[in-house]
Image (cartoon, helix red, strand yellow):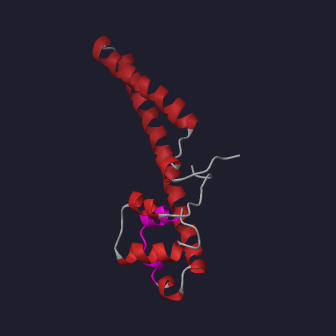
Amino acid sequence: MEKTQNFQNHARLMPLFHQVTAPILGINLIWSIYEVVHVHSLNSVDMLLLAIGLFTLAISARLMVLSVQDRVIRLEMRLRMQQVLPPDLRTRIAEFTVPQLIALRFAGDDELPELSRRVLDQNLSDGKAIKKMVRNWQADFLRA
């Protein structure tokens, strides 16, 4: 059973990436730099290029996953807002930025209309500030 989620603990770490892959590739990159500086061989340069490529590949893959996740959240929130918001706010759904929609996804249906109006009327753009305004936190355990 998942523990209760809130603003303080909602950040998601992917153990395989954050605690295994990234540190291994980071150490490999640092070691490869050390080897190029101290060994001065063609092999050490080759290993450095490979280390850079692997590290860049891992970071790029992570960023692509997060980009797709943001697009899915945008779509999900727009559909949800069509169902939950009053008619005057439905016409303004296109005004929301992706960071605003990402922050608003944690709000329950009961408070989403009020919070959405506040975000648009006050032009709030700080995702952390918007998340802190959520009273009835809706957990999201399916994030990448």
Spot occupied by residue 82 in the image (x, y as percentages of width and height): 57, 79
Q: Look at the image and tell me whether residue 46 can be seen.
A: no
**Image check: 108 left or right of 33?**
right
> Which residue is located at x 49 percent, y 55 percent?
67
> Which residue is located at x 41 percent, y 60 percent?
127
Boundaries of the magenta span: 92-105
126 in magenta:
no
Q: Is residue 27 above or below residue 102?
A: above
- When asked about the image quadrant of residue 37, the answer is top left
> Which residue is located at x 43 percent, y 73 percent?
96
- When asked about the image quadrant of residue 49, the answer is top left
Q: Is residue 94 above or below residue 135?
A: below
Spot occupied by residue 61 in the image (x, y as percentages of width and height): 50, 44
Q: Look at the image and tell me whether residue 128 can be seen.
A: yes
Between 72 and 55, the residue placed more toward the observer is 72
> Which residue is located at x 40 percent, y 26 percent?
29
- Magenta-highlighted stretch: main secondary structure? helix
Spot occupied by residue 8 in the image (x, y as percentages of width and height): 48, 49
In the displayed image of the protein, which residue is found farthest to the front? Answer: 135
Q: Is residue 91 above or below residue 48?
A: below
Between 110 and 50, the residue placed more toward the observer is 110
Between 126 and 72, the residue placed more toward the observer is 126
